[in-house]
Image (tube, rainbow, N blue to C red):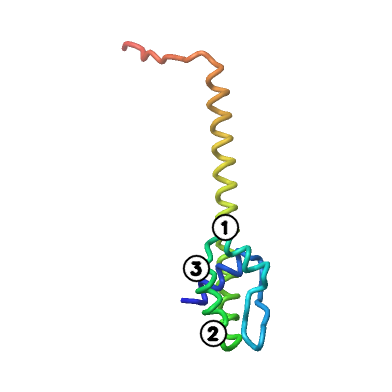
Amino acid sequence: MFDKLLAAVMSRLGITSFEKKDGKYALTEEQRNALVKMYNEDFVNKFEKDLSGMSDDHGLENALDYKNKLEALQAKYDAYKKSAEEQVRNLTELVDTLSEYPEQVYFPENG
């Protein structure tokens, strides 16, 4: 579970690794300040505790894998959103164009 949280934090910070202090993973002061602004002090304190408890690079490798998946998913979402916005613009333009013409009423022939 922490791997996924780690991946999300790494993605938000735009990093691929954490530095080590005294052999343990740690946030830089800049990273810490950014996270406090994004979330809150309590979250950052808990995150730092879990981060420093990470004993090997395996957790970091899993987090990078999740981070890459998260970024790929974000790219797909952004492409879909751009396409949808373009479709809305095109349909709005079509409605505006059609609104310029008088309305045509169809009367079926009596037969």
Residue at left offset 67%, top offset 70% = 29
Considering every residue shown, the one lying at the far left of the view is: 111
Q: Nearer the viewer, mark 1 or mark 2?
A: 2
- Determine the secondary structure under disc 3: helix
Residue at left offset 49%, top offset 68% = 42
- Residue 107 in picture, x, y percent from top left: 38, 13
Mark 3 residue crowding within 10 angstroms, few (<14) / some (14–19) / many (20+)? few
As measured in the structure, the alpha-carbon distance from the residue carrying label 1 to the one carrying label 3 is 33 Å
As measured in the structure, the alpha-carbon distance from the residue carrying label 1 to the one carrying label 2 is 34 Å
Q: Which of 15 and 36 lies nearest the eye of the viewer?
A: 36
Q: Earlier in the sequence, mark 3 or mark 2?
A: 3
- Determine the secondary structure under disc 1: helix
Mark 2: amino acid = Gly
Q: Can you identify the residue that label 3 sits on?
A: 42
Q: Can you identify the residue that label 1 sits on?
A: 76
Residue 66 versus residue 23 in the image, above or below: above
Q: Quadrant of residue 63?
A: bottom right
Q: Quadrant of residue 70?
A: bottom right
Q: Nearer the viewer, mark 3 or mark 2?
A: 3
Q: Earlier in the sequence, mark 1 or mark 2?
A: 2
Answer with left or right where residue 29 lies relative to residue 105: right
Q: Please report contact status of discs 1 and 2: CB closer than 8 Å, yes or no.
A: no
Q: Please report contact status of discs 1 and 3: CB closer than 8 Å, yes or no.
A: no
Q: Count the marks: how many?
A: 3
Mark number, residue 53? 2
Residue at left offset 65%, top offset 88% = 23
Mark 2 residue crowding within 10 angstroms, few (<14) / some (14–19) / many (20+)? few
- Residue 24 in picture, x, y percent from top left: 62, 85
Name the quarter where the C terminus is drawn.
top left
Mark 3: amino acid = Asp
Mark 1: amino acid = Lys
As measured in the structure, the alpha-carbon distance from the residue carrying label 3 to the one carrying label 2 is 17 Å
